Image: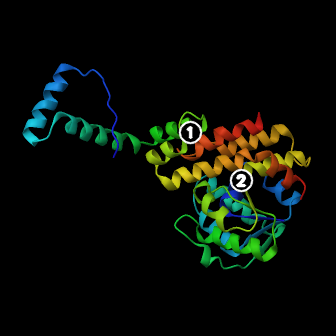
């Protein structure tokens, strides 16, 4: 798994809590933060309004398909992508329907 | 000729354009779809009402008996699978569905273009069967109350009705 160095500020008491948790669980601060972030994202990403907002960002071209897939899952991401492709062909398909 | 599945029928009925649709297009469906509509018609909600209205006009479209068993997957249900088989049997130009979750797999197996009911709305306008305002009103009805995956799709589609 590739990693990326990030710099951000945390409230001091959170840092203290994280350090205590790290000591008690025999992990380091980074591992504690990674675990906490994973859990938070897992909970968040299961919330429907969050997923809907992510899908909106895909339609607005703010995120790529691969990111969409990571967050909402492959099958649902493919459904979104396929729906978008049908709609992007909308004019052609409407013309074919009209000519029937 | 269009093969229409349960989801598309229900959408068009919810949008109150079912009569115009079956008058203007040569519509085919399957016995499996009718069974699904019968089950949906027992629901006490707008989809149940819509399914009942589709069943009320069953004489306005053709129904074929097709087994779609080879095409059933975790996302393609029995009704949709029967429609895939029906497209092959009758040589239809389109399969019309509103099951977005099944769309990728349906596109892989169906021998025709796959269209959504909202594209049918636009075609009905182009064919002079529906006024622009009627199509927009129908679209708004069909788009209402959608879940987290479908609502953004309908918002993206709304540009077709601007």
Picture disc at residue A58:
1
Which residue sits at x=59%, y=42%? B151
Residue placed most toward the observer, A86 or A63: A63
Horizontal and vertical percent position of residue B1: 84, 65
Q: To which quarter of the image does residue A35 belong?
A: top left
- On screen, residue B20 versus residue A41, left or right, reads right
Q: Quadrant of the C terminus of chain B?
A: top right
Give the residue at the far left of this rendering: A24
- The CA distance from mark 1 to mark 2 is 20 Å
What is the tally of numbered marks visible in this picture? 2
Mark 2 Cα shell of 10 Å, populated few (<14), some (14-19), many (≥20):
many
- Residue appearing at x 62%, y 43% in the figure: B153
Dot 1 falls on a residue whose secondary structure is helix
* Rendered residue at 61%/78% (across/down): B70
Residue A24: where, in percent of width, then height?
7, 39
Q: Where residue A77 sits: x, y (%)?
A: 53, 50
Tell me the residue at 73%/36% (across/down): B159
Q: In x, y percent, where is residue A21? A: 12, 36
Vertical placement of A64 versus B40: above or below? above
Mark number for residue B116? Answer: 2
Foreground pick, B36 / B148: B148
Which class describes the residues within 10 Å of circle 1: few (<14), some (14-19), or many (20+)?
Answer: many
In the image, residue B81 above or below residue B126: below
Label 2: state its secondary structure: loop
**In the rendered structure, the residue with mark 2 lies on which chain?**
B
Residue B56 appears in which quarter of the rendering?
bottom right
Q: Is residue B118 left or right of residue A80?
A: right
């Amino acid at each position: 798994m590739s990693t990326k160095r990030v710099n951000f500020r945390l409230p001091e008491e959170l840092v203290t809590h994280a350090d205590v948790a790290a000591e008690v669980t025999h992990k380091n601060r980074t591992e504690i933060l990674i675990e906490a972030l994973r859990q938070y994202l897992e909970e968040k990403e299961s919330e429907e309004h969050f997923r809907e907002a992510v899908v909106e960002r895909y339609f607005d071209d703010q995120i790529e398909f691969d990111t969409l897939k990571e967050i909402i899952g492959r099958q649902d991401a493919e459904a979104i992508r396929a729906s978008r492709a049908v709609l992007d062909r909308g004019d052609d398909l409407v013309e074919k329907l009209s000519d029937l | 000729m269009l093969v229409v599945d349960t989801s598309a029928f229900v959408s068009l009925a919810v949008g109150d354009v079912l009569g115009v649709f079956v008058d203007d297009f040569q519509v085919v469906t399957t016995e499996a779809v009718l069974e699904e509509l019968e089950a949906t018609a027992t629901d006490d909600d707008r989809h149940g009402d819509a399914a009942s209205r589709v069943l009320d006009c069953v004489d306005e479209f053709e129904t074929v008996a097709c087994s779609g068993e080879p095409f059933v997957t975790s996302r393609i249900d029995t009704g949709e699978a029967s429609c895939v088989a029906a497209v092959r049997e009758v040589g239809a130009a389109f399969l019309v569905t509103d099951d977005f979750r099944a769309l990728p797999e349906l596109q892989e197996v169906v021998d025709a273009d796959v269209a959504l009911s909202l594209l049918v709305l636009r075609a009905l306008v182009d064919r002079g069967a529906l006024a622009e305002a009627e199509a927009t009103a129908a679209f708004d009805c069909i788009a209402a109350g959608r879940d987290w995956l479908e609502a953004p799709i309908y918002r993206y589609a709304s540009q077709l009705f601007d």
